[in-house]
Amino acid sequence: MAIGKHWPLAAALAVLYAALGGCLFVSIQHNDGHFVYALDDPYIHMAVAKNLTDHGVFGVTRHEFTASTSSIIWPLLLGLTYLLLGTSIAAPLLWNVLLATAVVWIVYALLRRQGFPPWLNLAALLMVAFCTPLPAIVFTGMEHTLHVLLAVAFLSLGARFLAEEEASKWAKMLYFALPPLITMTRYEGAFMVAVVCLLSALRGRIRRAVALASLGALPVILNGLVSLAHGWHFLPNSVLLKGRMPADSSFDQAVQWFRSTAIMLIQQPHIPALGIAVLLLLVAVYRKDRRRWTAAKAMIWVVLLTAILHLQFARTDWFFRYEAYLVACGLLAVFTVVHGEFAESCRFRVAWKPIVACVMAAVLAAPLMTRAARSLTLIPRVSSIIYQQQYQMAAFLKDYYPGQAIAANDIGAINFYADVDSLDLWGLANLEVADARISGRYGPAEIRDLSADRRVAIALVYTDWFERWHGGLPPEWQEVGQWEIAAARSSRPFVVSFYAVDPNERDALVANLRKYSRQLPDTVLQRGPYVESRRPSARVARRP
């Protein structure tokens, strides 16, 4: 490939790599030379992959099977990487960089195929890269970049097939290969597959719709059967606990669900902004041609209906990742339709004046640009938070509690770095906890019984989580210390508390925390009985 001929792609990738390199450099500087991901969740996948390759167990720990990840393919991909190259902290990062490169390349190829001028193509590539935002989801070390890539490819092919455009044999094969890959990557991928199947059926392509639906459902069904065979639910705990099911049991619950949805949209204005843009373009294409079913119409309908399903049943935000595929697909649809209108008549075929259209475009783009800027500034900060707590918790357990039973609510880093038998008090990797949370009966009594059954020695938890949602922790647990990140600049306390679950472990826990305190970063403020009163770090922390 000649760089001169494809300079927009080369320029966009250069800017993306520069941003990734800058964020990586700053993060490592903030984390005492350690590379740390921006969330604890990627370490869950890494722990599963490590236990699969080292012990033949598909679980967060080596002791039992756990259906705790919302991606089927990602732990398997990491496991294969570990099997071939050895267990490495860098594997998810490298995979994400490669996949982000593929996202930029496929968007470039699609826009170039539509006749985008080079400078316009470059602007579109940069917007897709940084508004999605690819740098942020690369640093999550999870499967979301792969989801974006597959969703963009399926959106493009789906629009062409719905419009009955000519397609090669390879395009047809890829079209039917993508649904199972999408649902294997993220369970939310079923939304787009379902929408394309619905539109295919409405277009009279019943057999095609059935084939796509069957292929998309196959990995979910097989994974569900494996999970049931191990005594777990059909769907992973992460899907059951993090999904948004609309309330239908009472009027008050329905009102609460709609209220939470409205708050979510207000707090994340890029979602309604993109939705408004797609709706306006839908009006534009229908005013131009009401009868003919074009790829542009199909693309808009797929994005719009997929977004509705996602908002109904799934989460958004949480470090930009859940709706990233919707943003990328929405931008691709907007660029495709807008360029088609301009290329044909140099203006929209609607009644608005061009100046009004430009002002509206700027207003709608503002939330996306804000999202892009915010994502870049958050990467080093959030990585530093994970380093100061989850990474330190893992190092502490690795040094002082190898092979022992402990309880925690963040289970990723501690199980990847340390060999412990962890009880997940939040339920992602524990069936009993998940069932109790779903049924609304989870509380101190259940926590006490589960900890006793597993012979848990100590617990490392965010106390406020349990006080806010589950009535607190067992009162007989003895808190011996806290680690707090005072510089987190967030409403969340970022305080992890250490408890002696077994009273006989109290003195040992105090001694171990005192020994490890010398290794903690200076930014972690310590307090509690284990801290000697003469130490400066014993004072109560103040959050800015």
Image (tube, helix red, strand yellow):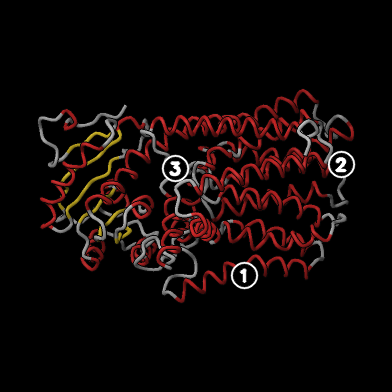
- Amino acid type at circle 2 is Lys
Q: Is residue 252 visible?
A: no
Q: Quadrant of the N terminus?
A: top right
Q: Mark 3 points at which residue?
A: 37
User: Would residue 316 appear left or right of 290 to someone viewing this image?
Assistant: left
- In-front residue for pair 27/328: 27
Pointer 2: residues within 10 angstroms few (<14), some, or many (20+)? Answer: few
459, above or below 197, in the image: above
Where residue 422 sits: x, y (%)?
30, 59
Check disc 3: other Cα within 10 Å, few if <14, some if 14-19, many if 20+: many
Label 1 amino acid?
Leu
Q: Mark 1 points at which residue?
A: 218
Circles 3 and 1, Cβ within 8 Å, touching? The answer is no
Quarter assignment of residue 533: top left
Q: Mark 2 highlights which residue?
A: 288
Amino acid under disc 3: Tyr
Q: Residue at x 16, y 50 (%)?
A: 509
